[in-house]
Amino acid sequence: MKFEPGTLDFELSPYTGLTRESWLEAGKYMLEGIFRHIDDFQKPIVMPRKETEITYPHLKASAETQAIQRKAEVFEGLTRSFFIAAPMISNIPELEICGYSMEEYYKNQVLRVCTPGDELYVGTYEDQQEIAGHVNPFQAFQQTVETCALVICLWVSRERIWDTYTKEEKDVIAALLQGYAHENTVPQNWRLFNMLDMAFLHMEGYPVKREVMRDHAQAILNYYAGDGWYRDGHSFDYYSCWAFNVYAPIWNLWYGYANEPEIAQRFEDNSNKLMETYGDFFDRDGWTNMWGRSGIYRNAATSAFDGNLLLRGGKADPGRARRISSGSLMQFLGREDFLYDGLPTLGFYGQFSPLVQGYSCAESPFWLGKAFLCLHLPANHPFWTARENNGVWDVMGSEEIKETCLDGPALCFTNHGANGETILRTGKVLKRPGDERGMWNYAKLCYNTKYPWEAAPENEIPIEKRLLAGSQVEAQQYVINDVVKPENGAVVLKTDVYGKANVTFWCGQTEGILYRRQFFDYGPDRECHWIQAVNLADFPVPYGILRADKLRLYKAPAYITLGSYGFPDNGTEVIEKNCRTARAIVLKGRDARGTEKQMAMTIYDGWSDLQLLYRKGTNPDSEKSIVIYASMKRERQYGGFEPYVLISQVITKESHEDFSEEELFPIEEVVYADEENCGSYGPVKIKLKDGSVRMVQYEGVEGRLML
C-alpha cells in the first residue's frame, strides 16, 4: 500500500503539502514495513528476499563465504534502517513500532553486533583480513561502509542511545570502530567512512591518528572535479551527492572546523558550489532522475541538501530544498509498487533486476533513509519553516528551457518549461566492453526524470524479422549491427561487444550544441583512429532533444539503430505522421500510476526507417514497454555517397494533448557544406521553423575529447 500522509499544509508547502509531521508519518510507514518481519526482539533486521540471483548472500557461493556475507547483511540491515529510525527516535523517544520500543531495539542491536562472542557480532577489520586469508590494503569489506552509517546514527540519536551506554559499553563499540577507522580501504568515496569513524572516535575522546585523517581528507579533496561534483572511482554519479556532499559536511562539524579549518572550508565551498545548480538537477515535481549505479537508493540523492544545511555557511535555499526532498519522497512512497511485502523493492519503482548490483542485499535500499536525516534539523530550522518554492520552475515560461552545462563532471541538464521534465546528458564514461549495465547506468544518450532508462534482452535476430525481438535496439543508445552470414546461408544481424559503445568522451558545448563522442569496443590495447565511433551533437527543444550525429564507421555492411526512451505500455495508441521527407511515430498511453504519457520520435536525414519494438520486463515503470527506433544500413566501408549525418528527435509530454505540427517536425531546412556527399565534411546548418538556426561543427571535436 502506498504512503498517504495524514498531515498536509498547502499554505506552507504549496507544491507537496508535506510538513515535518508528514515526514515523521513517512518514517513510521517505513519502519512498520520493516518491523512486521521481526517476530522476536532479539532478531536482527534481515528481511525476506524477492531477488536471489544477483544480490548477496550469494546462493552459489561456498558455505564459508555465505556465512561471512550473512554477517555483513546483519550489519547492513541494522545500520541502514537506523538511518530512518535514528531521527525518529530523536524526535519521538517513546516511539513503538509493531510493539517494539525503537530506542530499546536499536540500543540492544548496536551493542550486540559490536560485542565479541555474540551470535550477531560482525567482526573487526582485523577479523575480516584474517578470514580473507591475506592482508590486502584495498580489500573492500561491507562492514566498513556500515560503521560510517552507525556513527552518524549514534550522533543523530545521541541523547536517547549513545549517551545511555555505560563507559564499558561505549568502549566495546569504539573497539570495533578502530580498525575500520584507521586501516586502508578502497581509494574512492570509501575514504570518507574512515574519516567519519575517526572523527566520531575523536569527538568521544578516543585516540585517533591525525596523519591518517589528513591523508584521507587530502585524497577526498583531490577527487573534486568542479561545480560541486567529485569523481568516484572513474565515474560521476549520485555518490558525489549522497556520500561526498553529506559525509564531508558532517566531518566538518565533528572534526574539520576545529582541527583542519582550511580543508573544512574547501569542503564547505564545494558543497555551496553544488547548491548553485543542484536544484535544477530535479524536475518540476522534484523527481530524481534514474542514473548511475545504486539506483535502488532512490531519493537518497536529496540528502545533499541536508548536508549543506548542516554547514556553518551552507547556502542551500531551504524552501526549495524541502520542496525537492518532499517531491522526491512522494515520487517513490506514492507508488503502490514501491514496496514488496512492506519493504522497498530492489529496483527504482517496482522490482527491476537490470538495475541491481551484486554488492547489494535485501536491506540495501534502506540507504534511501539518508533522506530522512533532514529530521535531525530542529522544527524551527528554515528547512521546515520556509515556504516551499520551485526555483527556476516558478519563473519559467511554457516554451523556455534552462540549460546547465558542467565541464568538470561532464553533465549537461536541461529544464523544460513545456513539460516540466529534466533531461540529463552525460560524458566522461568508460566501461569495459560488454558491460551493458554500466552503459545503461551511465552512458545513455539522455536520461529523463519521467522516463527511467530501459534495459534490453540479449539475442540475435534475422533481418527478415525486422529487428522486432532483439537487443539490436537499445533505448537512447546507438547500436551497430554487423551483417553476418552463417554456414546455412541465412542473413543474420549480430550484435556483440563491437556493436555497443563502451566509452563516451565529453567535448563540451559550443553555441548551444553539446558535443560528445562514443567509441564502440574502445580499449587501451587498440588505437582509437580505427575504432567505430559516432560524433554526438545535440541540443534541447521545448519538449525534448534534437540530434544531428555523425557516423565515423570503418566496418561495413552494417545496420545502425537508435532507440527512443522506453514507453510504458499499459494500452498504447500508435499514430504515424509524415511531413515532406520526415517521419514521426507518436505513442499515447499511461504509466503504472495511471498518468497520461505521450512520446514521439521523428527522423530526418540519414535514417531509412522508423519502427516499434515491443518488450516485456525491460522497463522500470511497467512490465510491458515500447521503444520507437530508427534504423539505416551502411552498405560500403568507404565512399559511395552514403549518409554520414543522422538527424532525429525525441519529445515527450505528460498529457494526451496533441503535439503541434511544428513540435513534431521543427526543422525547416538542413544545409550541408558537402551537400553532394551527404555531409561528409564541413558544418551542418539546421534552420528551425521558429526562425532560429543551429550550426553543427564536427571539426574540432578531436581536440576537445575529455575523459
Image (cartoon, grey):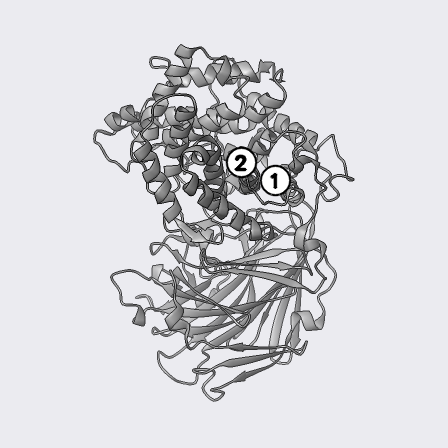
Labels 1 & 2 near each other (Cβ < 8 A):
yes
Residue corresponding to mark 1: 332
**Place of residue 631 in the rendered image (x, y in percent of width and height, measured from the top left):** 50, 70
Query: Looking at numbered disc 2 in the image, what kind of residue is underneath it?
Result: Leu
**Place of residue 668 in the rendered image (x, y in percent of width and height, measured from the top left):** 64, 80
Q: Is residue 686 above or below residue 69?
A: below
Bin the neighbour count of mark 1 within 10 Å (Cα to Cα): few under 14, some 14-19, many 20 and up.
many
The answer to whether residue 15 is visible is yes
Residue corresponding to mark 2: 368
Query: Looking at numbered disc 1 in the image, what kind of residue is underneath it?
Result: Phe
Label ID, residue 575 = none
Distance from label 1 to label 2 (Cα)?
10 Å
Q: Is residue 49 above or below residue 118?
A: below
Q: Quadrant of residue 17?
A: top right
Count of marks, rendered view? 2
Q: Residue furthest left?
A: 134
Q: Nearer the viewer, residue 641 or 325?
A: 325
**Place of residue 480 in the rendered image (x, y in percent of width and height, measured from the top left):** 41, 66
Q: In the rendered image, which quarter contains the C terminus?
A: bottom left
